Amino acid sequence: PLALNEHNGVIWEYKDNDPNSVLNFGEEKIHFGKDITDIEVCFLIDSTASMNTYSLGIIKTVQQIIKDGFNYVKKFKLPDSAFKVSYVFYRDHEQEKFMKEYITKVIPFESYVTSYSFVENIVYAGGSDECEAVMDGLNEVAKNLKWGGKTGKFLFHFIDNPPHGKNFSKL
């Protein structure tokens, strides 16, 4: 099989000219076309100042995942609309109060073509304490992002610090 992304193990894979190609999640296999009709990828990104150190790696990784998804769509002659990308950014709770900035910011699912370079324009700011508004970001992904019905749903989370709350940190 040809692996599309092996960043942390096989995320999705396909065999040349195999109409029964699958998305592979370890032991669980999902058949494209039978179980799902589209692929949606959400990038959940901590956009606090401490993440600036990792910005080039984030850009490279996000754009590689988008390229891999594009190759998958083209390989199976699927319409461009079969692969969509979304971003959810989060910072910290003091952002809104002191900096008049967002705690979370959602970029809804759109064509991978228009979302490819979006990651290059992230502004990393704020986050003066060790913990971040991670749970706020996850809440946006789970409850407010408009996921499709029969889609393969992928979430990639870029993070360097734990969430607020005594269950997650001793800070």
Image (cartoon, rainbow, N blue to C red):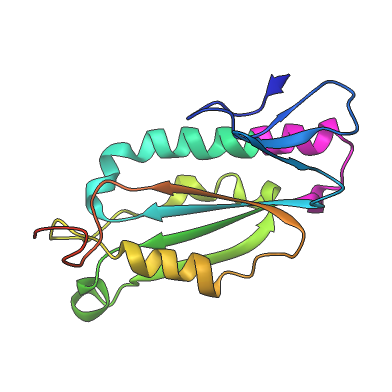
Can you give x and y, in whole percent of width and height, for residue 28 in the image?
66, 39
Nearest the eye: 89 or 169: 169
Can you give x and y, in whole percent of width and height, for residue 67 in the image?
65, 34
105 versus 22 height, above or below = below
Residue 155 lies left or right of residue 28; in this view the side is left
The quadrant in which the N terminus is found is: top right
71 versus 104 height, above or below = above
Can you give x and y, in whole percent of width and height, for residue 83 in the image?
73, 49
User: Main SS of the magenta segment?
Assistant: helix
Tell whether position 71 is magenta. Answer: yes
Nearest the eye: 113 or 29: 29
Nearest the eye: 68 or 3: 3
Residue name at image x 33 percent, y 48 percent: 159
The quadrant in which the C terminus is found is: bottom left
Report the number of discs: 0
Can you give x and y, in whole percent of width and height, for residue 15 in the image?
80, 22
Tell whether position 28 is magenta. Answer: no
Residue name at image x 81 percent, y 48 percent: 80
Q: Quadrant of residue 69?
A: top right
Hey, which residue is sitting farthest front in the picture? 27
Residue name at image x 77 percent, y 52 percent: 38
Residue 60 lies left or right of residue 86; in this view the side is left
Hey, which residue is sitting farthest bottom in the picture? 97
Provide the residue span drawn in magenta: 68-83
Residue 69 lies left or right of residue 156; in this view the side is right
Residue name at image x 82 percent, y 52 percent: 37
